Image (spheres, rainbow, N blue to C red):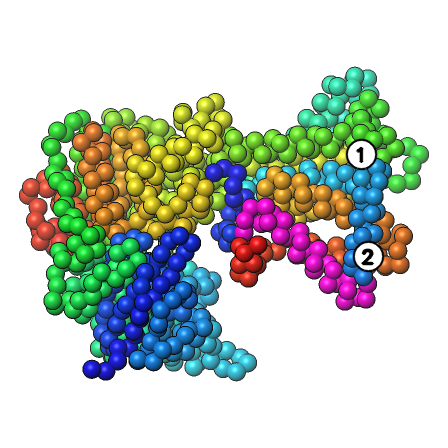
């Protein structure tokens, strides 16, 4: 029915027919296996490293809070990316939406210090969403009417967004008395409440989970979601059934950009509390991996975001406490990323093995 | 008597509870065309895949020239000279025809020896008397050309047993004739050909032997000279399939669709439809006869709203609707059975349920206020499966598991689950098995008797004569005849379709 088979990337054929749960889990397991091979090849004990990693990421309340904090922005970018992928739009511009969304939220936060908390937060969220969506508008229109590949346009616009926000913060909204390129702090009442005092974990996580529920609802309970999914999976059938392909494409791209704007906006409102030039370590790009890893499935996206959240927060610690050089951690992370996104359903032997299991 | 080229003894293949091949015995003589017929799900494809080394039987003996063999995959089969042309082609769209020809057995050691490949290609094309642009990417080739390329690929690998799985289901009658010519030529060269089809006239046109399968078993194998279509048809379905009476009752109402001087152009602005005018009324089936490529596709698209007309007027129930989109027309009661079954008609990647509700998902009872009820979608799908006899898959399974005939039943059911104002049906029974064809024609008839106006595009003269009230002939984009069916004979229709004066 609606939620059974997660649509594959850009609507290509579903090749694998692994049973549901295993199909979602398999890429994670394979990714870990591949990472282990890299570790063993360089003479490390993979189990020990993974153990340290798990311990660093999940070993206690603070660690878990940090991991969840690292998970939050990529949960948003993962949802944003999956929204577009499901409708067959390869939006790789979530990073750009994230930057303009973050800037819009920060600007709202420090420009209206006299507004009370709730309206100020709402306004900041609204403007972040608008900015993020606006960033996806041009590629959406270009693809819908001129058949210009959105991959290229959205990718290019990422750099425009990074440079534009950098220019804005450096030349117009630089905070006084700080050395780095950052905007003034947002008003205290514009901050999202922390979930665990002393950690970076904020209510943004809850908003992300709410959004994920909305994502599930959209694609399994609404006619709009059915339409978008049909466009991604079977554009010609959709067209002959009366679906307006252009409209669907534009809706999906705008929704994707909108959520991308929130990804940045809530990172500002919840964690950094100001705009910082170049603040994102590639949340938007990790979102692509999350969407692919999660096969655009709500639970898959959640698992994917957690997976990369654990890697990020645990990986940082492992570098600090063990003798493993940072480059090796990066190599393992890269390996995990590559294997995470590979479509392993194509491997016949894996399918057979899974069928037996 | 010498041993048969292929000999199967007690072949069994099970898929879970389904016995796809049940103790099958089959002898295929060397050098000739051997047809295998049977309804969808009879086990034909499975048996061919066993012969081609793609599937291993659970039990039974497989002999080549009287010697038992055990094939280890398709590569092993091709080494022994056995190759298969599949229902869905196995070509790489981006590569050129030449590259596809030699793929997997490329001449040259390290570098691709293009010249050797070209020489081989030329020789093969000559042998088959088939032209092909060898440098064009496969994506640009027509279906018929792709199929000929597949055949040449097997010949290039020196196959001398060629298996064709429903090769004509994707071809126009003209292309099918071409294929038969090739098959005869190959047989005359001493090659052994296994040929699967649904269409009995094809069996009697090309084959020397025919094997009938039903529910996994071989029911009969006979020399074509010793049997007749009626007997084979009976063996296929296990009973006498009396064709139902599809004659129109003649209660024709007001016009529903009216075309006035409609023109349309192709991709490069070349005219495809020239000032086409005709009407379709309530309770009437109007057939559009013509050989593929004479403007049928454009006509269908213009009527559906998938293509902008270049001129003229299209009226639905008297209201101009040339500017309206597909959705608006569907909301006015237009239904559509596309000729392009796995693209426009249905999606093989989507689930059966998705396909079943692809046009009704916005309406009650499936949806209210933009909210879709998965429970109702499932029930509606199950209902459709039951009412239209779709066999082979549950609602949640991908539509890929359905055979072509069952997929078409699903599409027909979706479009006719409510009686439409206007049904546009393009080649609705192409590639569908006997029983399915009869069923689909019956459904069209029923919709007409319930008051629907039906525009039926078909190349099959029998179908047109059996179903239609009126027939218009489309030739080079023009309507060259518009006749009540009583005044048309098969010969006259054939002549008109070929562009000969009436
Ligand atoms: N790979 C498969 N897995 C499960 N069932 C199959 C498979 N292939 C064929 N079948 C089943 O075996 C039966 C025979 O199928 P097939 O050989 O394709 O019939 P035909 O080609 O005559 O239409 C059908 O019921 C079909 O559903
Ligand atoms: Mg078959």
Residue occupied by mark 2 = A48
Q: Is residue B50 above or below residue B419?
A: below
What's the CA distance linking mark 2 and mark 1? 28 Å
Q: Does the magenta-highlighted stretch encompass residue A28?
A: yes
Asked if residue B235 lies left or right of residue A329, the reply is left
Q: Quadrant of residue B77?
A: bottom left
Q: Does A251 sit left or right of B67 as displayed?
A: right
- Residue at coordinates 48% horizontally, 35% vertically from top-left? A226
Specify whether tag 1 is near ligand 1 (CB below 8 Å): no
Task: Report the number of numbered marks.
Answer: 2
Q: Nearer the viewer, mark 2 or mark 1?
A: 2
User: Main SS of the magenta segment?
Assistant: helix
- State which region is magenta: A18-44
- Locate residue B408, reporting x and y percent: 31, 45
Counting residues from the start of the chain, the first of labels 2 and 1 encountered is 2
Label placed on residue A201: 1
- The answer to whether A330 appears left or right of A221 in the picture is right
Residue A42: give its label. Answer: none
């Amino acid at each position: 029915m609606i939620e059974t088979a997660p649509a594959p990337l850009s609507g290509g054929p579903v090749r694998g027919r692994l049973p549901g749960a295993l199909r979602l889990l398999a890429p994670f397991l394979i990714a870990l296996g591949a990472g282990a091979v890299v570790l063993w090849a360089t003479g490390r004990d993979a189990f020990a490293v993974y153990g340290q990693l798990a311990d660093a990421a999940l070993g206690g309340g603070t660690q878990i809070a940090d991991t969840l904090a690292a998970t939050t922005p990529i949960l948003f970018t993962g949802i944003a990316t999956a929204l577009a992928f499901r409708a067959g739009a390869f939006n790789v511009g979530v990073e750009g939406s994230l930057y303009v969304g973050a800037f819009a939220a920060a600007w709202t936060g420090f420009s209206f210090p006299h507004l009370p908390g709730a309206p100020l937060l709402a306004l900041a969220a609204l403007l972040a969403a608008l900015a993020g969506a606006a960033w996806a508008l041009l590629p959406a229109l270009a693809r819908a009417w001129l058949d210009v590949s959105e991959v290229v346009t959205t990718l290019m616009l990422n750099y425009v967004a990074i440079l534009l926000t950098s220019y804005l913060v450096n030349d117009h909204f630089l905070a006084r008395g700080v050395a780095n390129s950052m905007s003034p702090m947002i008003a205290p009442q514009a901050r999202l409440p922390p979930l665990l005092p002393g950690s970076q974990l904020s209510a943004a996580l809850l908003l992300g989970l709410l959004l994920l529920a909305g994502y599930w609802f959209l694609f399994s309970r609404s006619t709009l979601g059915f339409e978008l999914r049909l466009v991604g999976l079977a554009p010609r059938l959709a067209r002959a059934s009366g679906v307006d392909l252009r409209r669907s494409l534009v809706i999906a791209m705008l929704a994707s950009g909108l959520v991308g704007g929130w990804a940045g906006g809530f990172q500002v409102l919840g964690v950094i509390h100001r705009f910082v030039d170049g603040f994102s370590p590639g949340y938007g790009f990790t979102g692509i991996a999350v969407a692919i890893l999660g096969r655009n499935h709500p639970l898959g996206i959640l698992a994917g975001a957690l997976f990369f959240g654990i890697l990020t927060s645990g990986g940082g610690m492992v570098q600090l406490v063990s003798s493993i050089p940072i480059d090796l951690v990066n190599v393992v992370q890269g390996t995990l990323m590559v294997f995470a996104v590979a479509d392993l359903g194509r491997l016949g032997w894996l399918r057979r093995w899974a069928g037996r299991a | 008597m010498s041993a048969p080229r292929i000999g199967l003894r007690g072949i069994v293949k099970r898929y879970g509870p389904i016995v796809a091949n049940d103790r099958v015995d089959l002898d295929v003589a060397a050098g000739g065309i051997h047809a295998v017929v049977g309804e969808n799900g009879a086990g034909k494809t499975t048996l061919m895949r066993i012969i081609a080394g793609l599937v291993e039987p659970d039990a039974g003996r497989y002999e080549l020239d009287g010697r038992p063999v055990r094939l280890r995959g398709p590569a092993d089969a091709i080494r022994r000279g056995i190759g298969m042309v599949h229902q869905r082609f196995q070509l790489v769209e981006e590569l050129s025809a030449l590259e596809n020809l030699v793929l997997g057995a490329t001449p040259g050691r390290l570098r691709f020896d293009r010249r050797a490949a070209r020489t081989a290609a030329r020789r093969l094309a000559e042998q088959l008397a088939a032209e092909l642009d060898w440098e064009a990417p496969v994506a640009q080739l027509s279906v018929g050309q792709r199929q000929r390329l597949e055949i040449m690929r097997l010949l290039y690998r020196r196959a001398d047993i060629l298996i064709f799985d429903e090769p004509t289901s994707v071809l126009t009658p003209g292309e099918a004739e071409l294929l038969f010519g090739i098959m005869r030529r190959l047989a005359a060269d001493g090659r052994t050909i296994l040929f699967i089809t649904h269409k009995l006239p094809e069996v009697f046109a090309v084959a020397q032997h025919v094997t009938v399968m039903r529910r996994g078993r071989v029911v009969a194998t006979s020399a074509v000279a010793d049997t007749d279509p009626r007997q084979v048809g009976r063996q296929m379905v296990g009973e006498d399939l009396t064709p139902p009476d599809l004659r129109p009752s003649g209660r024709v109402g007001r016009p529903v669709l009216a075309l006035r001087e409609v023109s349309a152009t192709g991709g490069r602005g070349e005219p495809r439809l020239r000032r086409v005018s005709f009407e379709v009324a309530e309770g009437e089936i109007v057939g559009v006869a013509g050989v593929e490529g004479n403007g049928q596709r454009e006509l269908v698209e213009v009527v559906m709203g998938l293509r902008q007309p270049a001129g003229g007027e299209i009226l639905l129930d008297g209201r101009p609707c040339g500017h309206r989109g597909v959705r608006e027309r569907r909301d006015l009661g237009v239904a559509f059975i596309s000729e392009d079954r796995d693209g426009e008609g249905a999606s093989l990647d989507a689930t059966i349920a998705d396909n079943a509700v692809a046009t009704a998902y916005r309406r009650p009872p499936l949806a209210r206020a933009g909210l879709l009820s998965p429970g109702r979608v499932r029930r509606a799908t199950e209902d459709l499966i039951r009412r239209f006899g779709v066999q082979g898959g549950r609602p949640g399974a991908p539509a890929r598991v359905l055979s072509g005939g069952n997929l078409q039943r699903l599409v027909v059911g979706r479009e006719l689950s409510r009686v439409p104002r206007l049904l546009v049906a393009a080649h609705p029974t192409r590639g569908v098995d006997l029983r399915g064809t009869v069923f689909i024609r019956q459904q069209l008839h029923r919709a007409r008797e319930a008051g629907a106006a039906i525009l039926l595009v078909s190349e099959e003269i029998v179908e047109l004569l059996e179903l239609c009230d009126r027939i218009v002939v489309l030739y080079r984009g023009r309507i060259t005849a518009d006749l009540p069916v009583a005044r048309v004979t098969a010969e006259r229709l054939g002549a008109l379709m070929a562009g000969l004066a009436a």
